[in-house]
Image: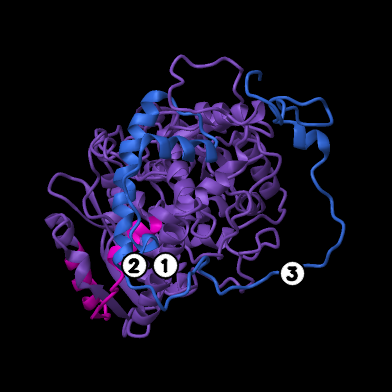
Chain colours: A blue, B purple
Amino acid sequence: MPAESSPEPSLTPADVKKVALLGRLALSGAELKNLTAELSQIVGFVSQLAAVDTDAVEPLAHPLDAQNVFREDEPAASLPTSEALRSAPRQDGECFLVPAVLGDSGSA
Amino acid sequence: MSLTDRSATDLIAALRNGEITAVACTEAFLTRIEATNPTLNAFLSVNGEGALAEAARIDAARAAGKPLGPLAGLPVAVKDVLCTTDQPTTCASKMLRGFRPPYDADVVRRLREADAVLIGKTNMDEFAMGGSNENSAYGLVRNPWDLDRAPGGSSGGSAAAIAADMAPLAIGSDTGGSIRQPAGLCGITGLKPTYGRVSRRGLVAFSSSLDQIGPMARSAADCSLLLQAIAGHDPGDSTSLAVAVPNYTAELDKPLNGLRIGRVAAHFGPGLDPEVAEHVEATFTAYEAAGATIHEVELPHAAHGVPTYYLIAPSEASSNLARYDGAHYGHRWDGSRPPDDGGMADFDSPLVEMYCRSRAEGFGPEVKRRIMLGTYALSAGYYEAYYAKALRVRRLIRQDFLDAFEQVDLIGGPVSATPAFKLGEKTENPVAMYLVDLYTVGTNLAGIGGISFPCGFTAGGLPVGFQLQGPALSEPLLLRAAHQYQQTTDWHHRRTAALPA
């Protein structure tokens, strides 16, 4: 069978580490071990869909009939900066503050 | 009869004719919450002072003869997944501990406009992910009928609050059964409206093509009052339907003569608890006695509903929850590295490390599982086999419903395979927990409406729920069919003996 209709359901710890970085989650060693087993089980479970014949079926991303909703492009009030920044963990009154965007990890 | 035992319909009439004041009504429910919440943990925050001030404002306005909204003075509990500017909004997650949103959800705005008294925010599974309310970062909720059992989820706090008379009306949200399943397990009535009937603006997004807000109450008549207040088009939600809102109470009393209800033989498989099956079959008989006819229909792809749902919902969730980045709002890592760091390779940059550690600390285990599953299903090499495949099966599942509704007006059946299960019973096995959604996910995948209401009790005293599913925008019929059943039964009036009266 072609690879796309019969995915290999068993995940390795290396797979899980890769997905964790994509999903922006720092896993502990214990979580890595548990998630490798749990995701393998869940992926095995959802893989039963491979048996459904969908050759002539278009994907349905949304339950309503596909539609674009347009509105006039008019200026309107938006959140004031102070409100937008109010819940930020770190900010300087004008901007959100974050660690370095480039460079090696090592400082927060 | 104490104030908290009375229906929302009855309380609104009593508030209007001056028999009771909004302050007295609010005080009665606050007293009940104070007495039962330490046991049940149904509320994450109680808006005591705010609710009493609002009630006093409404009493004064009424005394002055000013026009008031349709829910004036009535307490309403809101699931903690809707944004409220005056109350915390946590989604039962450490990620949003203490968060105060900068705007109200459209549903909250409509409730305020209806002059409802917002009495507090109810507990839930974290980010609405779960079927037992055991995934809350602020403690589980107990089922008022048996304190050792789960209330269901994810709207378990709202369901328990209604069942324990802590509020006459509650808002829930339903992504794969999160209103209907806890309603069934707690012996109350809950409606999942058609996708787009109620605005999702300000509903913290879990799975945007499946999420829908709906009413929870003791009876279908009470649900119709709440739906009336929250339904309608919102320019702030491009998926909300620009379709006129009907009067949901106008036709409740119309008899059911000629109504065609479908029965799906596959719903009665080996996994169905025999006592649940017995009460569900008796409900079909009751509908026949009320003038409806029962017809066998098939939903050939229904068995694929749960795996389809557990690809689509986590995929959308992994994208929606990307917004929790430790930068704009929510929890942020303080810079100290944990002792067990063995699950990660290198981070790409200091910024990415901040993201990864903030999210690792802020999210609970089930949320992490779903982000991981969704990220995997959307990742290069797997997208077509998992996510796109699930979208194709979703179309088949929706088509099954469209075909069935050519033959019948509504489809009936169980809402859950078993009555309320024991706390801890399914927490070790994610797939076993996912299978509790068997009878409910199809409604969301198809974008149609569904209602769950009590249809009996087990010998052990646990409520059993019945589900009706109907075509898009069939809410008036769903509410009427449930209401007519409730005219000849008293299951929805029963009260638990597990709590002080």
Marks 2 and 1 sit apart, C-alpha to C-alpha, by: 20 Å
- Helix, strand or loop for disc 3: loop
Kind of residue sitting beneath label 2: Leu
Q: Nearer the viewer, mark 2 or mark 3?
A: 3
Q: Quick check: B104 left or right of B450?
A: right
Q: Quadrant of residue B449?
A: bottom left
- Disc 2: which residue: B468
Q: Quick check: B471 left or right of B327?
A: left
B394 up-or-down from B461: above or below: below
Q: Is residue B297 magenta?
A: yes
Q: Are marks 3 and 1 on the same chain?
A: no
Kind of residue sitting beneath label 1: Arg
Magenta extent: B280-309
- Disc 1: which residue: B394
Q: Quadrant of residue B138?
A: top left
Q: Residue B277 at what x, y percent from top left?
A: 16, 61
Quadrant containing the N terminus of chain A is bottom left
Kind of residue sitting beneath label 3: Phe
Marks 3 and 1 sit apart, C-alpha to C-alpha, by: 27 Å
- The residue sitting at 41% across, 58% down in the picture is B386
